[in-house]
Image: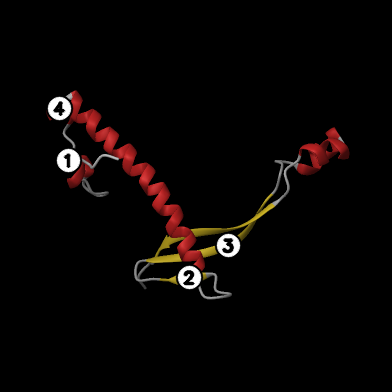
Amino acid sequence: MKRYISPITKELTPTDWKDKINLSDMSLDEMTELLADLKVMEAMGKKVGGYMKEAVKARMPEGEMEYIGARFIVTLNDRLRSGGLDGDKILEEMGEDWCEERMKPDIEYTELRLSVVTPE
């Protein structure tokens, strides 16, 4: 995997990126490099984010569903994902045999949400 070679990529932050990107001064090659760097960073962010979510869930004390950090609050919620958008309607229209053959089983999972700590 390549390193981020676009000089502007190293300088961007979530708050000042609009100030740092001056499209009229950038060549098509520089734009392409920056876009490619951002796509690599996006993919890496998804992988690292998923990894960190699982680590936070594993580290939470038994029975705890919320942790308040210095800047952010982590909240865990047990959820159930059902196999259909409207299971009762599908069952009524398609019949029990059809549903048993095709409907996916319900999936239990733990959702992780982050929110900002608001100063009191």
Q: Which mark is residue 8?
A: 1
Q: Given this view, does label 1 or label 4 mark the residue nearer the observer? A: 1
Q: Given this view, does label 3 or label 1 mark the residue nearer the observer? A: 1
Residue type of the residue flagged with mark 2: Arg
N-terminal of the pair, mark 3 or mark 1, is: 1
CA neighbours of label 4 inside 10 A, class few (<14), some (14 to 19), many (20+)? few
Residue 32, placed above or below residue 48? above
- The residue beneath circle 2 is 59
> Observer-nearest residue: 114 or 97?
97
For the N terminus, the image quarter is top left
Q: Is residue 23 left or right of residue 65?
A: left
Residue type of the residue flagged with mark 3: Asn
N-terminal of the pair, mark 3 or mark 2, is: 2
Alpha carbon distance from label 2 to label 4: 48 Å
N-terminal of the pair, mark 2 or mark 4, is: 4
Alpha carbon distance from label 3 to label 4: 47 Å
Q: Given this view, does label 2 or label 4 mark the residue nearer the observer? A: 2
Secondary element at tag 2: helix
Alpha carbon distance from label 3 to label 2: 15 Å
| Residue 55 place in picture, x, y as percent | 46, 63
